[in-house]
Amino acid sequence: MNTISVLLVDDHTVVRSGLKALLGTQGDIAVVGEAASGEEALDAAHEHTPAVVLMDLAMGAGMDGIEAIKQLRQWNPKQAVIVFTTYDSDADIVRAVDAGAMGYLLKDAAPEEIFAAVRGAVQGKSVMSAPVASRLFQQLRNPDEILTPREAELLSLLTQGLSNRDLGKRLFISEATVKTHLAHIYAKLGVETRAAAIATAIRREGMR
Amino acid sequence: MNTISVLLVDDHTVVRSGLKALLGTQGDIAVVGEAASGEEALDAAHEHTPAVVLMDLAMGAGMDGIEAIKQLRQWNPKQAVIVFTTYDSDADIVRAVDAGAMGYLLKDAAPEEIFAAVRGAVQGKSVMSAPVASRLFQQLRNPDEILTPREAELLSLLTQGLSNRDLGKRLFISEATVKTHLAHIYAKLGVETRAAAIATAIRREGMR
DNA sequence: TGGTCTCTCCACCTTTTGGCTGATACCGGT
DNA sequence: ACCGGTATCAGCCAAAAGGTGGAGAGACCA
């Protein structure tokens, strides 16, 4: 059996060494490189061509994890990337999967889970922590059930092409509140601009 | 027969006096007020409650004609408004009709045409200059045939929620060019934001 | 040849959005 | 009595979008 080359990407040195030690216990897994930022990750991936990239989403400065995943996959569409992060926000999961992540592990995952994810990734299998999987599943089934009534109301008006100012007037709330609601809506829909939110909402049937 | 009260709105004094003299020759038409801006128009309309408002679309400072029409109609939904302007751009026509204009005359219209428009307006009839009518008709029949191929291409990508930068990259043109195309698209669709353009485009069937 | 249309680009300026942080308040369930 | 979710608002800052006006190149047609 071939050994699986792994690239670790995390801005915390301690996490990297911990992972390295952990993965080192497995005969068929070898850490071939480390990176502390998205930029470094790209360089390292080009240099070492690892079979699997284990990536933290939250990175201090520069390119964030999502962007790094996108670019990794752009450079090599077959690159297996596993997200290994502390948080399990709905939006992050969707965006990571969207960007092309093969797996999604929380940092409190059991060692066996991590090994399984790495081995699965090289075979094209998607492995994710149980809580993550259930969230993703729920999200895919009824994506907007998670919007609060107020948010849905706003989204509906948004599809009419109203500006923040107009939305505020229409709903008798301040522009600041409108912005807050919008930020929440974007996060839940997994988009980052009002344009994309409108496109998503309208195509999501019924809202036309 | 009752005399028809008319409010003139135009930022050019000469145009107002010319119109006033012209309308004065008709026994059944009386100019009851004049305004040089959108704001003044609203005040004057509240004060004089004219049967018909003759409004120039292009007004130097402050509220533009379209907005003035909207507000006039909001205050009194039965207010008859006739647009009396120099230009006959497609977008202006659509937007004015949308805002609730009863008629649309070009400034080179024959006196009889103007009289007819005023008399027609109080009866709820829509009167417009021939060239304007034909444009409007064409626009209503196939609203996007007027988009150039390149513009249609851009609009299609726009509905995917792309940013100007992304659009530029995708089409191999500069962001400046993207903005130019967008401005043209907005004008042709009769909207003023990308959000509204997306909503319009997607709902316009087929583009989903 | 001259006019019109389309596509391309630029600079300058204003307004709108979006990201981030933090705060208050009400409700409902543990 | 405390906590999580919802809804409300503020201020600051950076990025994106929109408005205006101008300009050149190529196509096409009268």
Image (cartoon, coloured by chain):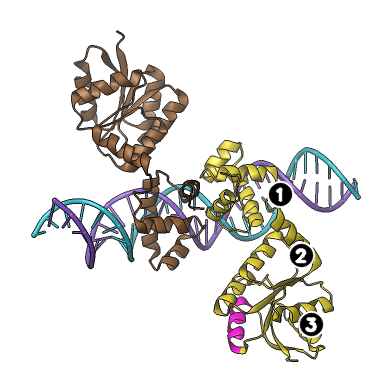
Chain colours: A yellow, B brown, C cyan, D purple
Residues shaded magenta: A37-47
Mark 3 neighbour class, 10 Å CA radius: few under 14, some 14 to 19, many 20 or more = few
The residue lying at 35 percent from left, 49 percent from top is B145
The residue lying at 71 percent from left, 60 percent from top is A90
Pinpoint residue A116: horizontal percent, then vertical percent. Answer: 79, 79
Pinpoint residue B64: horizontal percent, then vertical percent. Answer: 36, 37
Question: Looking at the image, can residue B198 be seen?
Answer: yes
Q: In the displayed orientation, state which residue is furthest to the top.
A: B1
Compared across the picture, whether B35 is left or right of A75 comes to left
The earlier-in-sequence mark between 2 and 3 is 3
Q: Which residue is mark 3?
A: A18
Pinpoint residue B70: horizontal percent, then vertical percent. Answer: 43, 32
The residue lying at 71 percent from left, 51 percent from top is A146
Query: Which amino acid type is marked by label 2?
Result: Val
Which of the two marks, 2 or 3, is nearer to us in this view?
Answer: 2
Quadrant of the snapshot with the N terminus of chain A: bottom right
The chain ID associated with circle 2 is: A
Element type where label 1 sits in the image: loop
Residue A132 is marked as 2
